[in-house]
Image (tube, helix red, strand yellow):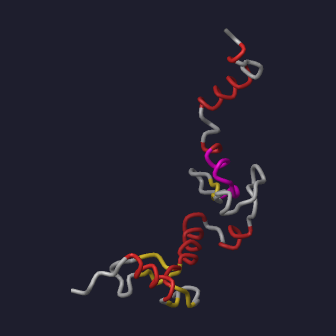
Amino acid sequence: MGTRRTDHQLKVESLTRRKECLTCGLNQCYSQFYLKPESRDGRQNKCKRCVFDSHLRNSYGIDATQYHAATHCDACGVAFDSISQRKKHTDHCHSTGRVRGFLCSNCNVAEGHLDSPSLRKLADYKDRTTKTDLRTQT
């Protein structure tokens, strides 16, 4: 049985060792491949980008270029970027599979509750209490 590698050794290996993606053919560092312990080198044969692109095609029937071209939320217009954690979500109808657009995390969560009776009650509550301030009441 071989010697176990330290976390530091694994991190260095993931940044220095390279392999070629079977889908796109790019030679990339190991960190660009998901782990797959049962494979010979411990990594998947497709790079992370190609795995994601396959997911878009298989799950939503859209081309990766459509996804990557979307730079702003279709609902609120906020820019997608990793700094503000505005993650891009593929908005789709769970019944038909039809893709409606791309939403930020906040809009995606809100959209999921639009048909909820409690959301309508919350909107009514907000309308009723617009001028209420409990701090001024004794």
**Displayed quadrant of residue 97:** bottom right
Q: Is residue 56 above or below residue 97?
A: below
Name of the residue lying farthest toward the top: 138
Quadrant in which the C terminus appears? top right
Q: Is residue 98 above or below residue 45?
A: above
**Displayed quadrant of residue 126:** top right
Which residue is nearer to you in this view: 81 or 83? 83
Which residue is nearer to you in this view: 101 or 6? 6
Quadrant in which the N terminus appears? bottom left
Q: Position of residue 137 (x, y in %)?
A: 69, 11
Viewed as shown, does residue 104 lie left or right of 42?
right
How many labels were placed on the picture? 0
Q: Position of residue 109 (x, y in %)?
A: 61, 46
Q: Is residue 102 magenta?
A: yes
Residue at 76%, 49% in the rendered image? 76
Q: Position of residue 53 (x, y in %)?
A: 59, 73
Name of the residue lying farthest toward the left: 1
Magenta stretch: give its range.
Answer: 99-109
Residue at 64%, 55% in the rendered image? 91
Which residue is nearer to you in this view: 117 or 124? 124
Viewed as shown, does residue 75 lie left or right of 98?
right
Which residue is nearer to you in this view: 71 or 91? 71
